[in-house]
Image (tube, rainbow, N blue to C red):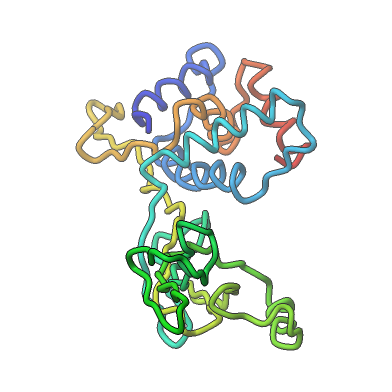
Amino acid sequence: MFNVNRFKIYCDTLANKDQTGADFKPSDFNSVLPQNVNSLIEQYFGKPKWATLPYLGNERNQAIKDYIANSEINLKVKLPTTDGVITLPPDYLHLQSLTYQYFKKKEVVCNHCGCNKCVCVNVPEGFQTGDSKCEPELSSIKINEEITIVNNSQWNQLFTDANLYPDIEHAYGQFIGNNQVEIEPQQIVEVYLRYLRYPKTAKWGYTIVNGIAVYDPATSENIELPEILLPELACIQLAGIGIHTREYWLQQLYDQKNIAGT
């Protein structure tokens, strides 16, 4: 997260309005800022195309993803299912993972001979004897499994292919609109959602003093992005309000990212 006033000062500096005359209203600045913040998150999580980038570019993108994943907008919640459907949180933006838990019986083998049925003279503790053989007890182990998200056409194929048919060890999900996900099999009663939420609506708050907009921290909302994205966001922000910066390299960065589709 970085301070919105610091970002505003940075944009003012790049615009160089004292020399170029390029200026923007605070209301225009605030009107495009929230969408530009969301656009950057979508750019790194929703439309990755790292194959078109050189090695160092790939490393940079991964670093940004790591920073965002370790930020306050990355959350994990436990959600109940209702008739095989979960409702995503209202602030849901991007899916990180969707997992569930189930318990599986595991045989305990003889710690003497390594067999699940043995004829040891001294029966190991925890085993029951019967017909001169000891029968191992079954213990439950907890399994964490990820739900495979498929599209609507793939969803229909799940129920016509015996190898793909959903069961407790192989669960599937599909988005069905209205911020909901359908889960099969329906015996899964709760899931664990790791997701990116929408950032809080960034805003540069201000009051008018003698005809000049003065920063007001009480009505401001800081920007929930990692520091590494400040220059890139500034480039998008200024382009969005029709100002071309004097930093040629910064403008080129934004243009090249659009061409590469990253």
Residue at (67% x, 48% y) in the render: 47
Residue 97 appears left or right of 211: right
| Residue 19: percent from left, percent from top | 53, 11
Q: Does 87 appear above or below 23?
A: below
Residue 54 spot, x, y in % from top left: 77, 26
Viewer-closest of 159 and 8: 159
**Residue located at (45% from left, 57% from top):** 111
Q: Residue at x 78, y 38 (%)?
A: 51
Residue 198 versus residue 5: which sits nearer the camera?
198
Q: For the N terminus, give its image quadrant.
A: top left
The foreground one among 240 and 255 is 255
Q: 3 and 89: which one is in front? A: 89
Residue furthest to the front: 121
Would you say 40 lies left or right of 112 here? right
Query: Measured from the top left, where is residue 37 in percent x and y?
Result: 49, 42
Residue furthest to the left in view is: 218
